[in-house]
């Protein structure tokens, strides 16, 4: 099932690459839905509180898993993630949102954020996701780091007990979609930014999950 999902994601990504490249105005059209009276609708104290929650939640989730694993190691609890599970969680977060998204793409894409473009009151011209010729020099719009980090919550969801896993995965997807919508409402990212940020992370999570499952099977613990 994981391999099939990985194949579907890769095929979907190829189609989305083509769609956003051929019709970049999709990004402008979706961004305009969040722009009212000269400002993006997510801006404000309430939006900031929600953003803070969605930004911090994945890291608190990771911390809970690590603490539970430590407690299991010292015999404080009977059940919890083992060392391989923690490596899976840390590696997927480091390679996806960490290295690929924030370490590479956001630094080389040069794409201005919606709020930075002339279409929404900013100083710079809009750039399609595949242009890499914008005026942004650092921490740019493509891709969304917060959407990528939210998508990482799929990793701990996949570690849930089999009977609870579908609900956990659904919750991770809902969390990702909500984070993506909030980032667009802030004028921080375009639809393609949040879409590819999430997709790239999903692919990395599913790929590493295959490594995790094979290890569990070889150890006879699955």
Image (cartoon, rainbow, N blue to C red):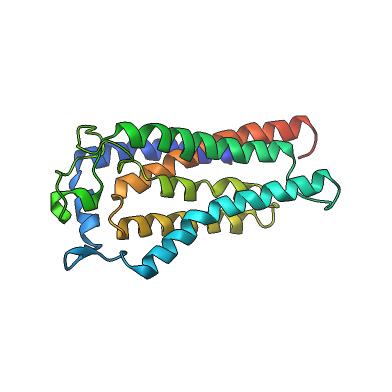
**Residue 3 visible here:** no
Q: Is 157 above or below relative to 10?
A: below
**Residue 143 visible here:** yes
Q: Is 116 above or below relative to 39?
A: above
Is 199 situated left or right of 66 in this image? left
Name which residue lies at 32% across and 67% down: 44
Name which residue lies at 61% across and 34% down: 210
Name which residue lies at 39% across and 63% down: 48
Quadrant containing the C terminus in the rendered view: top right
Q: Position of residue 163 (x, y in %)?
A: 69, 56
Is 106 situated left or right of 53 in this image? left
**Residue at the outermost right position:** 75
Q: Position of residue 124 (x, y in %)?
A: 15, 44
Toward which corner of the image does residue 89 lie, by quadrant? top right
Q: Is 2 above or below relative to 164?
A: above
Quadrant containing the N terminus in the rendered view: top right
Toward which corner of the image does residue 143 lie, by quadrant? top left
| Relative depth, front residue between 117 and 198 | 117
Name which residue lies at 63% across and 37% down: 88
Q: Position of residue 94 (x, y in %)?
A: 53, 36
Give the total number of marks visible in the rendering: 0
């Amino acid at each position: 099932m994981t391999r099939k999902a990985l194949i579907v994601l890769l095929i979907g990504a190829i189609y989305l690459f083509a769609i956003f490249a051929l019709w970049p105005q999709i990004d402008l059209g979706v961004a305009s839905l969040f722009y009212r009276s000269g400002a993006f609708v997510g801006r404000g104290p309430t939006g900031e509180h929600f953003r803070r929650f969605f930004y911090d939640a994945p890291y608190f989730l990771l911390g809970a898993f690590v603490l539970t694993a430590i407690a299991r190691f010292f015999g404080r609890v009977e059940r919890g993630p083992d060392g391989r599970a923690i490596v899976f969680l840390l590696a997927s977060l480091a390679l996806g949102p960490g290295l690929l998204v924030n370490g590479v793409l956001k630094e080389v894409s040069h794409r201005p954020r919606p709020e930075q473009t002339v279409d929404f009151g900013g100083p710079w011209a809009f750039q399609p996701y595949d242009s890499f010729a914008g005026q942004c020099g650092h921490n740019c719009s493509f891709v969304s780091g917060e959407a990528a980090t939210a998508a990482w919550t799929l990793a701990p969801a996949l570690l849930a007990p089999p009977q609870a896993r579908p609900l956990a995965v659904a919750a991770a997807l809902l969390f990702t979609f909500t984070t993506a919508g909030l980032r667009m409402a802030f004028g921080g990212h375009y639809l393609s930014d949040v879409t590819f940020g999430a997709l790239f992370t999903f692919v990395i999570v599913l790929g590493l999950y295959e490594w995790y499952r094979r290890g569990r099977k070889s150890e006879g613990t699955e």
